[in-house]
Image (cartoon, rainbow, N blue to C red):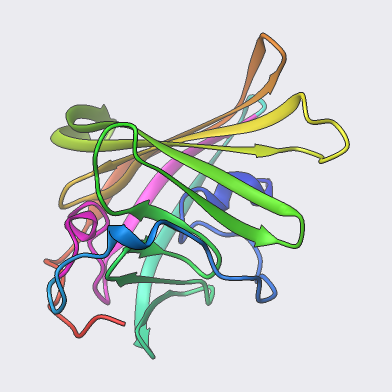
């Protein structure tokens, strides 16, 4: 089973296929962290070569297992074994086209990422420093982020909604995806962390 692009991209390094370059993510300029220091968001997605995560994936009732491992550090990017890249900069944690976490980490903070011509994802932080859990364990310090995007610009009442939960010192522990249409919401996919091994993030010059 192959998960849809929008499910796996919500987990950053969990992409299924290589993507063409897209316009950079956009976000408020006031969110930059102190120069030379990792932003607070880096704690919620620890990056180092050798880090790996295992997820139980469910899509429309079908189950599978996904494994992600960081195998290289190249030009400021941490790269998984399938070639997808993620990095930390002064504004947060991002993949090739979107910020997964953006400074400041505060409830209600928002940002927008333009992922393709005419296509944008709108993000909002729902909770910070709250407990969360997954099959891999219980974690005391977590951040939950919601993203919303049109399934098709021609049908603006249909939205794809992702809720991604990050745990400090761990990374992504849960992704839940639903299709909303008007007042109706239909869950479509879920990723749950079942095992992980991460090293402490290395202090590197920020971009």
The furthest residue to the bottom: 75
Is residue 55 inside the magenta stretch? Answer: yes
- On screen, 113 above or below 188? below
134 sits left or right of 61 in the view:
left
Start-end of magenta stretch: 38-59
Q: Position of residue 102 (x, y in %)?
A: 34, 54
Q: Nearer the viewer, residue 67 or 165?
A: 165
114 sits left or right of 71 in the view:
right
180 sits left or right of 52 in the view:
right
- On screen, 1 above or below 204? above
Q: Residue at x 38, y 91 (%)?
A: 75
Q: Residue at x 50, y 56 (%)?
A: 14
Residue 137 appears in which quarter of the rendering? top left
25 sits left or right of 48 in the view:
right
Q: Position of residue 140 (x, y in %)?
A: 11, 32
Q: Position of residue 139 (x, y in %)?
A: 15, 34
Q: Position of residue 58 (x, y in %)?
A: 56, 32
Q: Residue at x 34, y 39 (%)?
A: 109
Q: Nearer the viewer, residue 70 or 11?
A: 11
- On screen, 141 above or below 51? above
Residue 35 appears in which quarter of the rendering? bottom left
The furthest residue to the top: 183
- On screen, 163 above or below 77? above
């Amino acid at each position: 089973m192959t998960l849809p692009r929008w499910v796996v991209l919500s987990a950053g390094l969990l992409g299924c296929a290589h993507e063409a370059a897209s316009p950079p993510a956009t976000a408020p300029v006031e969110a930059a962290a102190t120069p030379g220091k990792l932003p607070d968001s880096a704690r919620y997605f620890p990056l180092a070569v050798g880090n790996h995560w295992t997820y139980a994936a469910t899509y429309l009732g079908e189950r599978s297992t996904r494994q992600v491992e960081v195998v290289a550090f190249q030009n400021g990017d941490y790269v998984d074994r399938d070639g997808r890249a993620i990095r930390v900069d002064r504004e947060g944690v991002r993949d090739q086209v979107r910020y997964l976490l953006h400074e400041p980490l505060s409830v209600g903070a928002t940002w927008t990422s333009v992922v393709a011509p005419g296509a944008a994802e709108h993000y909002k932080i729902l909770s910070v420093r709250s407990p969360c859990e997954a099959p891999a364990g219980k974690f005391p310090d977590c951040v939950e982020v919601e993203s919303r995007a049109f399934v098709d610009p021609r049908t603006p009442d249909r939205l794809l909604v992702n809720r991604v939960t990050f745990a400090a010192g761990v990374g992504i522990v849960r992704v839940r995806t639903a299709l909303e249409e008007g007042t109706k919401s239909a869950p479509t996919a879920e990723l749950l962390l079942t095992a992980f091994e991460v090293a402490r993030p290395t202090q590197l010059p920020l971009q």
